[in-house]
Image (tube, grey):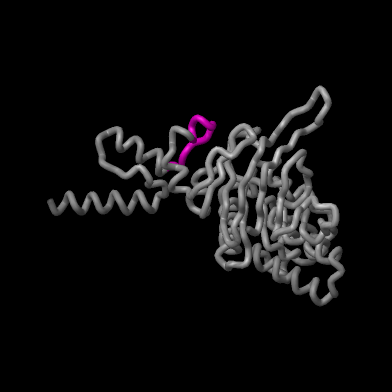
Amino acid sequence: MPIQVTNLTHTYSAGSALQSTALHDVSLSIEDGEFVCIVGHTGSGKSTLVQHLNGLLKPTSGRILVDGEDMNGDKVDKKRIRQKVGLVFQYPEYQLFEETVARDIAFGPKNQGLSAEEIDRRVRAAMAHVHLDYDKYAERSPFELSGGQMRRVAIAGVLAMEPRYLILDEPTAGLDPKGRDRILGMIQELHREGRTTVVMVSHSMDDCARLATRMIVMSKGTVLMSDTPRAVFAQADAMREAGLGVPAAAQLCEKLRARGLDLPHDLYTQEELHAHLLRLWKEAAHA
């Protein structure tokens, strides 16, 4: 399996009065080509989990294998593995620091020791991926851009490393609806191209319903559920017990069923609900 997490436990400030265990014996896998959404109430362990996937945090116990290599093995080249697993933090624009957009995006590839020609190719390709025109933005200061554009520059800096796995921790946090849609559309494009396995931490059940091939539901530092969005959202009561909701379409379905309308329990996207209601209306019209 490309990424395998086995019996992962992480305790912050172990042995001190501030000791707190964020992850308890977590085991899961990320398959090649998946789009996985990780959800959970605040404090459920989502961010702690994803920071283990490229070695930013070291397990208190347990193992993380990336393409069969132990991330924390004695002889492992952790820098090489981190080039495979790109991690985009919340508010990544706070990490921008170079004088121009192109230089900021080129920082990672330069540290890989690549040629000037390869660095230029990667910068141009990464900017194209995030829909920033090279001629227009390459020599501009990233600090002159809008918040959404700055975030796209920061993501481009990770993409320029050409990771096999892209991990994103709340990539749309704090953005306006337009900026949010741009970021999500860009991530979806990367996944559809088939070269990138995506793992995204999100609070939006609607985004997960629309984008994910699988969801991992975290609760109190453990994995509560790991299944398709359809199977997860069918367990609305369990989601609420975990402090989470269901997509707006699923909420509407519940209200319509309460009023006597016969609707399946696994409708969770607006498109599915619209198609089903239209079919019911046509059947009623021809009855």
Residue at 40% x, 38% y is 251
Residue 73 position (above or below residue 135): above
Q: Is residue 247 magenta?
A: yes
* Residue 29 seen in the figure: yes
Q: Main secondary structure of the magenta part?
A: loop
Residue at 80% x, 59% y is 141
3 left or right of 74 in image: left
Residue at the limit of the structure toward the top, as seen here = 17
Specify start and end residues of the magenta stretch as a single range: 239-248
Which sits in the foreground, 95 or 238? 238
Q: Residue 41 location in percent, x, y?
A: 59, 34
Residue at 70% x, 70% y is 125
Q: Quadrant of residue 237?
A: top left
239 left or right of 3 in image: left
Q: Quadrant of residue 45?
A: top right
Q: Is residue 269 magenta?
A: no
Q: Residue 159 location in percent, x, y?
A: 71, 62
Residue at 59% x, 39% y is 223
Which sits in the foreground, 19 or 254? 19
* Residue 175 seen in the figure: no
Which sits in the foreground, 265 or 222? 222
Q: Quadrant of residue 118?
A: bottom right
